[in-house]
Image: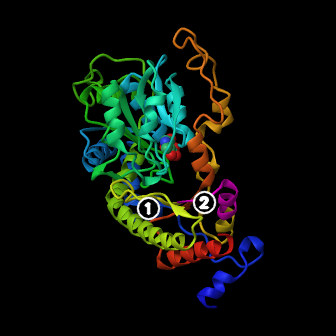
Amino acid sequence: MTMSDIIEAPLAVDGGAPVIQRELNRYKGAAVIGDEEKAAVLEVLESQSLFRYYGPHLLSKVAQFEQDFAGHVGAKHAVGASSGTAALRLGLAALGVGPGCEVIVPAVTFIASVGAIVAARARPVFAEVDESMQLDPADLRRCLTPRTKAIMPVHLGGVAVDMDAVLDFARTHGLMVIEDAAQSCGSLYKGRAVGTLGHVGCFSFQLEKNITSGEGGIMVTDDDELFRRAAIYSDQGGQFWTAHAGVRDTVGGQPVIGDNMRMNEIAGAILGCQLHKLPELLNRMERNTAIVRSAVQEIADEHPGLYLRPSHPDRDRHALSVLVYLTDAAQADAVAQALRGEGVPAGKVYGGLPVYAAPQILNQWMITDGCPFNCSTFFPEPIHYHMGMCPRTEDLLGRAVSISIGPMYEEEDLEDLITGVQKVAHHLL
Ligand SMILES: Cc1ncc(COP(=O)(O)O)c(C=O)c1O
C-alpha cells in the first residue's frame, strides 16, 4: 500500500484498519529498568536495612539519592518522600500553609495538587490556564485575596509554567511559591530545572513519571529552615532525623507532631540508578517530541481548523505531548476518538474537564468534616466551586487534543503515529 492508500483508507472508527496495530511503549523511566536497578535492590535486600535511618548494615541509599538529586537539579536541599503527594504536603507544611490560608492552583492539574492543599486544611483557589495549558500568570490577580498564602504553579506534562511572571507576582504580594513538578522531572525553564525556582519544588516518582520507583517523591529547597521543617514533618516530627535521635545531624531544633512520609531504602536505591538515566531519557524525549511537533505543524499548515499549542523553546523542550487545538469541542472529541481508533495515543486533557469538575471538589466532599470548607473560625465565608469558574480554561480544554510522546518510541513508531494523524486530518478536517 502506498502512503496515500493508507491515508485515504476508511478510518478505523468507521470500520477501516487502524494504522498502528500494536501498543506503543509510552513508559519513561519504567521502560529502562534494568540490571543496575536489580543489583541495587539486591544490595539493599542483602543489607537487611530497608529503613532509611538505621539497620544492621545501613547503606544510606535515600540519603545518597537526596544529595544526588539536589545536585542534579541545582537545589541546596532535598527531602525524599513516599510519594509526590507526600512531597507536596511536606512543601505546604514547610511553608506554613494551614487553616485560614488560600493557595492558588491552576484549573488544569491532577487532583493530587488540590488534595494536598485540602489535606493541609487550606483552600484551593482555581486560576485559568493559557494556551500553553499551564497556569496563566495574568489570572493571578483575580484569584488574590487577603488570605492568599501561596501559589502552586504546576508544570504539566514536561512543560514549564511562565515562572518569571509567577515569581514577580509572588514577590509583589509577599506570597510563597510551591512548584508542583510531579510531571516534569528534569524539565527546564530558561535553562534552570523546574522545581528550583520557587521556595519549594516537589516531584513524583510514580510509575508514569520520567524516573520511577513505582511510588516515591522528593521536595527540594534552597532554604535551610524550610528544609528543616519538611524533614522533621516527614519523620514524625523529627524522630530519627534530629540530633536528638543521634542519627542524621545536629540541626534538628524543636520537634513537632509530624507524619510519616519517609522514602524507603529500596526506592532510594532504584532512584539512584534511574537518576543516571534521566539525561538520556530527556534527550530522547526532546528528539521525539520535536519530530512529531514539526510533522503535526505541517499537517496543521494544510488544515486551517487545526493549530498547535504555541511553542516556547525556553519552556517546552521536554514536553511529554504534542497538543493541538480544534475549532470546537465536538470536533476535538471526534478527532481524539478517531486518533485513538488508529492506535495513536491521544485524548482530551484530563477528559476535557478542569480539575474542579470532579464531584468531590465541586461538592467539597472530604473524608472528615471541618476545615477548610466548613470552619467558620478560620474561614468566615463559604467558598463555592462551580462549572464556569474558569471559562477560558473550559473552552481550551474542550478544544484540545493531546498526543502522548514517549522517549522509547522508535523511528517506525514515530512514522506510524504521524501517518495516523495525517489520516485523521484528511478525513475529519
Ligand atoms: C501534577 C501532579 N501532582 C501531583 C502528583 C502526585 O504524585 P504521586 O502520584 O506520586 O503522589 C501527580 C501524580 O500523578 C501529578 O501528576
Query: On residue 326, which mark appears?
Result: 2
The majority secondary structure of the magenta stretch comes to helix
Q: Is residue 326 magenta?
A: yes
Where residue 234 sits: x, y (%)? Answer: 40, 29
Whether residue 303 sits left or right of residue 272 in the image: it is right
Residue projecting furthest to the left: 250
Question: Which of these two is toward me, 288 or 206?
Answer: 288
Give whichever of 287, 211 is nearer the camera. Answer: 287
At 68% across and 70% down in the image, what residue appears?
428
The mark found on residue 33 in the picture is: 1
Locate residue 267, reporting x and y percent.
42, 47
Does 309 sit left or right of 200 as displayed?
right
Marks 1/2: CA–CA distance? 37 Å
Q: Residue at x 57, y 49 (%)?
A: 396
**Residue 54 appears anywhere in the view:** no
Q: What amino acid is at disc 2?
A: Leu
Badge 1 element: loop
Residue 292, image x and y in percent? 48, 70
Q: Which residues are magenta?
A: 324-336
In which quadrant will I find the N terminus?
Answer: bottom right
Q: Is residue 306 above or below residue 352?
A: below
Answer with mark 1 or mark 2, whichever residue precedes in sequence.
Answer: 1
